[in-house]
Image (cartoon, coloured by chain):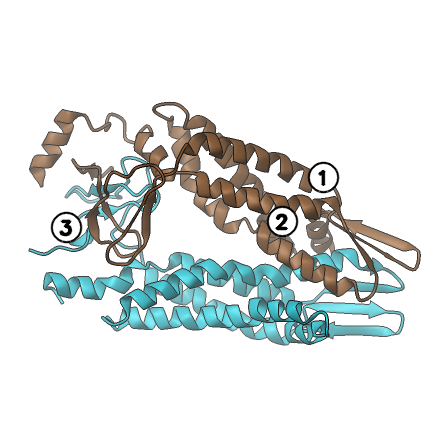
Amino acid sequence: MAAPTAMHQGMQSCGVCGLLSRPSLEPGVRRCPRCDEILSFRKPNSIQRTWAFLLAAAVCYVPANVLPVLTTTTATGSESDTIMQGVVLLWSPSGWPLSIIVLVASILIPSAKIIALAYLLVSVQRNSLANNERRLRLYRTVEFIGRWSMVDVFVDTFTAALIQLQPLMSVEPGPGLFFFAAVVVLTMLAVESFDPRLIWDATSAQEVGYG
Amino acid sequence: MYNEPLSDPSLIGCPHCDLLQRLPQLPPGASARCPRCNEELWRHKQDALNRTVALSLGAAILYLVANSVPMLGLTIVGRSASTTVIGGAEHLWQEGPRLVAALVMLTAVIAPALQIGFMLAIAFGAHQERPRRWVGILLRFYPTTRVWSMIEVMMLGVLVALVKIADYATVIPGLALFVLGALIFLLAAMQANFDARDVWNRIEWARDGTHLSSENAQMVGQEN
């Protein structure tokens, strides 16, 4: 019998140390004999957990973009900026590359991440057989670039920490920053809970003849 | 309850597509990829432990310097201000959302410290022929410290902030900024030279007495 995956052969691959091992027939929690990690064939409740983190991130995405992330107070008054307004403010003949960096890191990456993960989840739930390689590459890309959306959190943190020149000028973080940071963390947790092996499972099942 | 290891330790399941396959013996410097999904399964690093020790020691020193000197300063109409990495998080803790301050602290200060410290301890501990259990425990949590350690992202954020502030005031890049720049390269090199698989292959097992002896291997082999 063609048996392409470890799961079809009843073997569990350890996500921490990579050891392949065979669970005994008795019930109970399975552990990796080498590194003590709790084992299962696939990450437990991967799809539900990823959806939960993803929906939470999508909900936070709205206030993250609508509420101000920075409030600047000068002698003449105070002004609040959202992320998008920050991008526009940075746009100048010399500053436009940074403006683009913030636009990509803070607006494009988080939204692309949410859309990409939703697509991966739906395709797995529909037992899609197509584009396995491309879907896996999408997952790896999302995993790799996700951290860069933290850029804006650092920009706002250090701008606010430095510009404390009362009464001349001071900058304080706004409520949008919390939601924005929440989007970054929640999408990172969503990526972490998604099990990429699910992408190939429908194809593997068909190859072995269960499909 | 511990799983039963296989008789053939070169059998593995691809972490990205679960394809069952045999990992070939690789000469140092070579790497193996999954034939189905192209995931890199193992890269046999050359002289991995010594290089890892050297690079992580260097990273530890740079880390300490980067966190004890100012990173950014400014002057405006005779007034000046400066901040360290921790100072930025501290200000946010007082004025802004505390959870965000904690996140900045975690990603810019705590996780990098753990990442470097863990790697240093692992590389030292792995010099033994059969590394002890504690090495495995650190190695198990090392990837998490790596995911949340975001010095390179912070660096980009600081540069953007610097340009932003330059509109209002004269910015003074601090020593820490340059040290952090060097640290980013050291961390990348440290990561690239470390061979986790080599350490796992030699480590003391969590389940006592499962050091696959030849008898033991035969027994498991018959089961298949």
Q: Colour of chain B?
A: brown
Nearer to me, B218 or A47 = B218
Could you say where residue B136 lies in the image, as x and y percent from the top left?
A: 38, 34
Q: Nearer the viewer, mark 1 or mark 2?
A: 1
State which chain disc 1 sits on.
B
Q: Which mark is residue A70?
A: none
When asked about the image quadrant of residue B213, the answer is: top left
- Going by the numbered disc 1, the residue's amino acid type is Ser
Instruction: Report helix, strand or loop for mark 2.
Output: helix
Q: In this figure, which residue is indicated by the disc labeled 3?
A: A9
Instruction: Report helix, strand or loop for mark 3.
Output: helix
Observer able to see residue A203: yes
Seen in the image, is A34 located left or right of residue A63?
A: left
Seen in the image, is A46 located left or right of residue A177?
A: left
- Going by the numbered disc 3, the residue's amino acid type is Gln
Q: Colour of chain A?
A: cyan
Q: In this figure, which residue is indicated by the disc labeled 1?
A: B68
Packing grade of label 3 (10 A; few <14, some 14-19, many >=20) is few
Which comes before the other along the chain, label 1 or label 2? 1
Observer able to see residue A190: no
State which chain disc 3 sits on.
A
Give the residue displayed 37% in from the left and 26% down from the top: B131
Discs 3 and 2 carry the same chain letter: no
C-alpha separation, residue under disc 1 versus residue under disc 3: 54 Å
Please state, as top left, top right, bottom left or bottom right, where the N terminus of chain A lies in the image: bottom left
State which chain disc 2 sits on.
B
Q: In this figure, which residue is indicated by the disc labeled 2?
A: B105
When asked about the image quadrant of residue A86, the answer is: bottom right
C-alpha separation, residue under disc 1 versus residue under disc 2: 15 Å
Give the residue displayed 12% in from the left and 25% down from the top: B215
Seen in the image, is B60 located left or right of residue B65?
A: left
